[in-house]
Each structure stands twice: as structure tokens, then as C-alpha cells.
Image (cartoon, grey):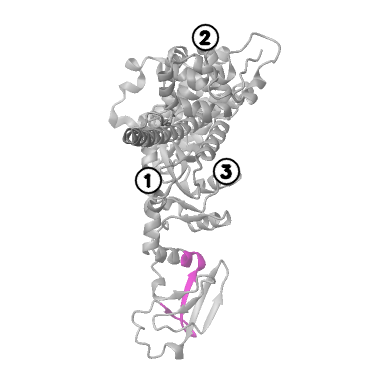
């Protein structure tokens, strides 16, 4: 049976239900804390309506209050506490009571199983993204934050998995398969699995076969586990029930990624030949590998920012807001993250005018893609400078045709080729006696001299010229500010090492941790704003008191400002 207290109802000022729970001094502290921001700008937007579909409106035992229970899952990620600690805070922490509007003692006491169930519902239905979108948009609207300037970057994060070498990947996958096989098909296990293989993979670590191998025999050991993996695949390839087991499919995938099977011979691939999206740990198949940052995941973040000029205005102290969060495996290239980010931001009505990013996002394709969304992508050009000597020529920025060489002469003929390439030709008479001929990058041809180039290379060339300008350097210097956000993301919310495994749960956790940063930023701003208001009111009241004393008129009323 459903138990939902609406959070969208309006209260008469001064008659709110929490005023009978807390003293005036305690209420003042709560209203200046993160709990007030959560209660006002996050709690009403929790997707309780979607969650309620999992419960009957009439039958069964009455649920815990769903807003409080959903908020409990969110706050656990905000503060990175254990399940037991989260339950204790719900029971005893008055900041949590206020933020969740949970004053009924029966709703403050919950069980581990209830917490696990609610977290699974939110994770399985991808509701964390809805919570983030609605709450962030509410904060932006309430604060009047300008979203025209944005910046994008990624941060490497890890799931709760061990970092394994290739031998351990094979061994863990084999052990996982053997355990499942023994549990579900014990007759097949007893008939096919030898005692030697059983001892090899089931002994404790101190006595295991792998701890008895010398480092010098590592390659032999790797070959041995690869042969065992292939043996298991072949041994059960005709057993349909076994083939449907996820652990059997995992063995097949690891062999395909790590080895080459040639006439029943298993040949180990060189490390460089193993794809970056290969299995990094059988316990977390979604994790990928990045040669620079290692195994795990990465989270793409887009946030707003302000220039020094913006900070001089009335709204200059308003916080920057994270408006987009997406978690993906570490093997994904940053260049492919731009389009999903632009699409999501545009659909939510948060499209900006400028987007700062590093060189990984700054390809020509992404620059043109951003322009289609009406966004100017400001990022360094990826790759090396062309060695064809494009700097010796002037180009039309619209048609990319050469308009002048070192001597200032236009080509006599411009030939448009296939594959978006151009050949500029100067006739022999045009170049005859040219003083720049020694330094000219053109090459001899039948008609005189020519310069062949692709349009894409000229686009990069023109961008590199712009990147040397003072205008670009002034605009791009604000990109570095997102590094501070990344640092806060992995240190304050403890997002670097998650308690979860798998892309679905990692995404759930990372999204809510990004929302925590937004909440704390708004809370810090409102706290400072409240201090400034109190300071201003104190100054005005002080002046009124001084003026009142100077008048020495006891009949004159003294109207002090109250807040």
C-alpha cells in the first residue's frame, strides 16, 4: 500500500509543519545549511510517481513514506556513507529529517532490505538521471544562472573491482565458470572436470597453483590458463544449457580478445594487440581500459562558467552548475562524447553559446557538429601541424581556395579533386624569376608548379592560426576551471572509487554525486548571501538607532528591519 506525502503543497508562511519540531535557533541553522536546499530544490522533484508503480495502491503492507525513502538513497550517495550509517542517520540525524521532511518516527526507521530494494529500483530504471535533470533545472531557474558559457571534460573513476593482470583474468573467469557449472550441472562437472583442474582453481590462495609459479615462468603460466579456457569451451560447446550460461559466454569472449586459435592451437596475443574494450575483470565486464589512465570508467561532465567580466556584475557570485553527467567505460574516446552531451543539453533547453574543451574534443568534425547545434566549440586542434607548408599561402576561409602565395600571386588554375581535395596550379610563366622560389613549398608539374592539399587539413591550419591569437587565449583560459570541479568530484564525494560494479550502477552513483556538488554550491552561495543580508540589515538598523538618539524625541517611533 502506498504511503506518499506530497511535497508540492504550499504552506502559510510561519505555519510550516517543521516549525513545531525545531526551536527558532535550530531552525535558523537548518535554513542556512545544505538541508534547506535539498528540501526545497531536490526533494519535490524525486520521481516518486514512477517509483510508486512498483507498489499496489490498495493491497499489502503500508510502505515507508516514498519521498523520504527515495531521498535516503540520494543522500547516501551525496555523503558516501555505508548502508548501516545511512539507516542510522535517517533515524537520528535532524539535518536528514529536515531535508527529507521526515518527522514521523515510523518512517525514520527502516531496514537494510528496504534500502537495497529502493536503490535497485532507482538504478534499474535509470531514475538517477531524472533526479539530476529536474533538480538541476530547478536550481538554475531558482538562482537565475546564466548557461550561455559551458565547459566539458572527463574524469577517470574506478568501480569496486581489483585491477587484474592477464593471468588473473583467465583464472577468475575459469573459477567463476566452474563454480556455476558445479552449482547448476553437477553431473557434467563430475564427468568432465578432472581432479587436477579442480585442485588448480579451487585451492586457497596460499596453496594455489598460481602462487607456486616463478616470475620467470609467467608466459608459460599464461599459456596454461589460456589452454584450460579453450579446453572448457570445446568440452561444453555441444551442451546447450551450458552455452546459455553467462560465465561460459565470458570464457568465449576472453579467448577471442586475448588469443588467436589456429588449428586447435591457442596463441597468446601480444599486449598491444588486445583491444581496449576487452574484459578487465570478470566481476565487472563493463569496465574498459585506457592506456593513459588505466582500467575502469570515465565520467563526462559539462558545467557552466563565468568570465572575470561576468563576475563584476550583480550575478557574479552565483555558483557554476554541473548540467550534464554521463559515465562510460574507460576505453571510449573523449571525441565521441561531445555529440551526446550537446544533444542532451539542447533537448533540456540548456544550450549554451560557447563550449570550452581540451584537444581530445577539438577535432574538425566536432567543431562542425557543435556549429550545427548553434554552439561555438573552443578547443585546441588535435594532431600535428601539417608539413606541407600551408603557412606559405593565404586561404579563403569560406571556400578554402588559395588566394595568394609567398609572392602574393593567385593560382592560375584551381582544380577540385575527389575526396574533398584541391590542387592549385601556377603556370610556368607566372613563377618564372620568382625570388621566393627556393622557399616555396610548391612542386613542379607539367604546367608549372602546383600545391595539393585536402580541405580538412586547411580547416585545421586556419584553426591553428586562430589559436595563436590573443582572443583565443583569453577565451580558452577559463577551461582550466573545470579541473577544480573534477578534483572536488573525486575528493569531496569520493567518486574516484565507487562501491558498485557495472555501468548501470556506476552511472547511478556518479550522477547523484555530481548533483551533490550542485547542492553544496547553491548552499554555500545562499549562506554567503544570507550573511551579506544580515550584515546590511545590521548596518541600516545601527544607523536608525544613531539617528533616533540624535533626535532625542521619545515620541518618534523606531522601526527596525526584521529578517
Vertical relation: 236 (above or below) 320:
above
Q: Determine which of the numbered discs, if any, sits on residue 481 in the image.
A: 1
Vertical relation: 389 (above or below) 447:
above
Q: Determine which of the numbered discs, if any, sits on residue 105 in the image.
A: 2
Q: Which of marks 2 and 3 is nearer the N terminus?
A: 2
The residue lying toward the viewer, choosing from 104 and 59, is: 104
Q: In the picture, which quadrant includes the C terminus? A: top left
The residue lying toward the viewer, choosing from 395 and 253, is: 395
Image quadrant assignment for residue 533: top left
Q: What stretch is highlighted in magenta?
A: 442-459
Distance from the alpha carbon under mark 3 to that under mark 1:
22 Å
Distance from the alpha carbon under mark 2 to that under mark 3:
40 Å
Q: In the picture, which quadrant includes the N terminus? A: top right
The residue lying toward the viewer, choosing from 331 and 187, is: 331
Identify residue for label 3.
344
- Nearer mark to the viewer, of 2 and 3: 2
Vertical relation: 512 (above or below) 311:
above
- Whether residue 415 is visible to the viewer of this picture, yes or no, is yes
List x then y, in percent, for residue 202. 42, 15
- Whether residue 284 is visible to the viewer of this picture, yes or no, is no
SS at badge 3: helix
Question: Would you say the residues marked 3 and 1 are in contact, meaning their CB atoms lie under 8 Å apart?
Answer: no
List x then y, in percent, for residue 288. 46, 36
Image quadrant assignment for residue 368: bottom right
List x then y, in percent, for residue 147. 50, 47
SS at badge 2: helix
Amino acid at each position: 500500500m502506498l504511503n506518499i506525502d506530497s511535497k508540492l503543497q504550499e504552506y502559510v508562511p510561519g505555519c510550516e509543519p517543521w516549525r513545531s519540531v525545531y526551536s527558532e535557533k535550530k531552525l535558523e541553522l537548518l535554513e542556512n545549511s545544505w538541508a534547506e536546499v535539498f528540501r526545497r530544490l531536490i526533494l519535490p522533484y524525486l520521481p516518486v510517481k514512477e517509483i510508486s508503480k512498483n507498489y499496489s495502491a490498495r493491497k499489502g503492507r503500508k510502505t515507508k513514506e516514498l519521498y523520504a525513502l527515495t531521498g535516503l538513497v540520494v543522500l547516501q550517495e551525496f555523503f558516501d556513507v555505508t548502508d548501516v550509517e545511512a539507516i542510522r542517520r535517517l533515524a537520528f540525524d535532524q539535518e536528514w529529517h529536515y531535508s527529507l521532511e521526515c518527522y514521523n518516527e515510523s518512517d525514520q526507521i527502516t531496514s537494510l532490505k528496504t534500502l537495497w530494494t529502493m536503490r535497485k529500483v532507482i538504478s534499474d530504471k535509470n531514475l538517477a538521471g531524472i533526479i539530476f535533470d529536474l533538480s538541476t533545472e530547478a536550481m538554475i531557474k531558482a538562482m537565475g544562472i546564466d548557461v550561455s558559457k559551458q565547459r566539458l571534460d572527463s574524469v577517470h573513476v574506478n568501480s569496486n573491482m581489483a585491477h587484474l593482470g592477464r593471468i588473473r583474468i583467465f583464472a577468475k573467469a575459469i573459477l567463476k565458470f566452474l563454480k556455476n557449472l558445479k552449482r547448476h550441472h553437477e553431473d557434467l562437472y563430475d564427468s568432465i572436470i578432472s581432479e587436477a583442474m579442480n585442485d588448480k582453481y579451487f585451492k586457497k590462495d596460499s596453496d594455489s597453483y598460481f602462487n607456486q609459479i616463478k616470475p620467470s615462468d609467467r608466459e608459460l603460466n599464461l599459456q596454461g590458463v589460456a589452454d584450460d579456457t579453450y579446453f572448457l569451451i570445446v568440452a561444453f560447446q555441444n551442451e546447450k544449457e551450458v552455452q546459455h550460461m553467462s560465465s561460459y559466454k565470458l570464457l568465449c569472449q576472453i579467448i577471442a580478445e586475448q588469443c588467436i586459435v589456429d588449428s586447435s592451437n591457442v596463441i597468446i596475443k601480444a599486449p598491444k594487440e588486445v583491444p581496449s574494450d576487452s574484459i578487465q575483470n570478470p566481476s565487472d565486464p563493463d569496465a574498459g581500459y585506457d592506456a593513459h589512465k588505466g582500467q575502469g570508467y570515465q565520467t563526462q561532465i559539462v558545467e557552466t562558467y563565468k568570465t572575470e567580466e561576468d563576475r563584476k556584475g550583480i550575478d557574479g557570485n552565483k555558483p557554476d552548475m554541473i548540467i550534464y553527467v554521463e559515465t562510460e567505460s574507460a576505453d571510449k574516446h573523449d571525441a565521441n562524447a561531445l555529440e551526446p552531451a550537446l544533444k542532451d543539453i539542447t533537448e533540456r533547453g540548456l544550450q549554451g553559446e560557447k563550449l570550452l574543451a581540451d584537444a581530445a574534443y577539438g577535432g574538425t568534425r566536432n567543431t562542425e557538429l557543435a556549429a550545427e547545434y548553434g554552439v561555438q566549440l573552443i578547443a585546441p586542434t588535435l594532431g600535428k601541424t601539417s608539413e606541407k607548408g600551408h603557412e606559405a599561402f593565404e586561404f579563403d576561409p569560406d571556400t578554402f581556395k588559395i588566394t595568394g602565395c609567398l609572392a602574393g600571386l593567385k593560382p592560375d588554375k584551381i582544380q577540385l579533386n575527389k575526396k574533398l581535395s584541391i590542387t592549385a596550379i601556377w603556370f610556368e610563366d607566372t613563377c618564372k624569376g620568382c625570388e621566393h622560389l627556393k622557399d616555396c613549398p610548391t612542386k613542379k608539374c607539367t604546367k608549372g608548379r602546383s600545391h595539393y592539399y585536402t580541405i580538412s587539413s586547411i580547416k585545421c591550419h586556419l584553426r591553428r592560426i586562430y589559436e595563436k591569437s590573443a582572443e583565443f587565449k583569453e577565451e580558452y583560459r577559463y577551461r582550466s576551471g573545470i579541473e577544480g570541479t573534477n578534483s572536488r568530484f573525486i575528493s569531496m564525494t569520493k567518486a574516484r572509487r565507487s562501491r558498485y560494479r557495472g555501468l548501470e550502477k556506476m552511472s547511478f552513483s556518479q550522477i547523484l554525486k555530481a548533483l551533490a556538488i550542485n547542492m553544496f554550491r547553491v548552499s554555500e552561495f545562499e549562506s554567503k548571501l544570507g550573511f551579506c543580508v544580515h550584515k546590511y540589515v545590521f548596518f541600516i538598523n545601527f544607523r536608525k538607532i544613531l539617528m533616533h538618539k540624535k533626535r532625542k524625541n521619545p515620541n518618534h517611533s523606531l522601526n527596525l528591519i526584521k529578517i
